[in-house]
Amino acid sequence: VEFTCVHGNKVDMIDYGKEGGWSVGTEDAWDAVVLAGGRARRLGGMDKAALEIRGRSLLGIAIAACAGARYRVVVGPERLTDEPVRWARESPVGSGPLAALGAGLAVLPSGSAVVVVLAADLPAVDAELVGRLRAAVAGSTRVDGAIVVDGQHRAQPLLAAYRRTPLEQAITKIGVLRDRPVRSILNLLTMAAIADTTAADDIDTPADLARWTHNRPGRP
């Protein structure tokens, strides 16, 4: 079985039929890190994670998508949530999503094989997609994770599942995380790619918000 693989900005095909076995299973312990900070400049500085789509906040959507995780860490200012989470903040606050990811990983206890990473601005993300990402990671020893690729063939590092050890090694190798692009980790990892244009549709602008609020009844 062939599968598209991302090596930094390069897309290759790998053959799972030649694999020697699985290194993690979908039943193994996994954690989640949800990034819910950022300044949302194009939305006038509003609290993007608190925006409601069909009666649920974007943060609530992301947390619910990670149901079944051993721990769910939210990196951002503390808010009321319907489900229990751990909280973290990058230092200094506002130093970018890569620094936020590092802060989230730092508060996770050891013992998980996979970490799902989500941005809190994805109205279509759900548990089914997270399950697909985790299954793709489980399907090969030759990948360090699985990542959603959007309709423009862009890999989305904040919509992905990573093997924890390679992810932490990549974070350590980068060193200074402040204001570094989060895509930097993709240059150090080999990721299985899952095409999903709907899941990758985020909310960055008033037009995005209006489209989801008025014209999108839900995930197809």
Image (cartoon, grey):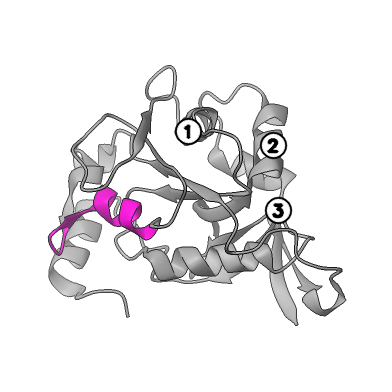
The quadrant of the rendering that contains the C terminus is bottom left
Instruction: Estimate the spatial distance between the alpha carbons at disc 2 and disc 1, rounded to whole Å.
Output: 15 Å
Question: Disc 1 designates what residue?
Answer: 104
Left or right placement of residue 25 versus residue 20 in this view: left
The quadrant of the rendering that contains the N terminus is bottom right
Left or right placement of residue 153 versus residue 72 in this view: right
Compared to residue 188, the image places residue 125 above or below, namely below
> For numbered disc 3, what is the local secondary structure?
loop
Q: Where does residue 77 sit, x and y in percent of width and height?
A: 27, 29
**Mark linked to residue 9:** none
Question: Disc 3 designates what residue?
Answer: 144
Q: Nearer the viewer, residue 137 or 177?
A: 137
Residue 66 placement: quadrant: bottom left
The residue range painted magenta reads 53-65
| Neighbourhood count class around disc 1 (C-alpha, 10 Å): few under 14, some 14–19, many 20 upward | many
Left or right placement of residue 207 versus residue 87 in this view: left
Instruction: Estimate the spatial distance between the alpha carbons at disc 1 and disc 3, rounded to whole Å.
Output: 19 Å
Lower sequence index among marks 2 and 1: 1
Question: Disc 2 designates what residue?
Answer: 170
Q: Where does residue 155 sit, x and y in percent of width and height?
A: 56, 58
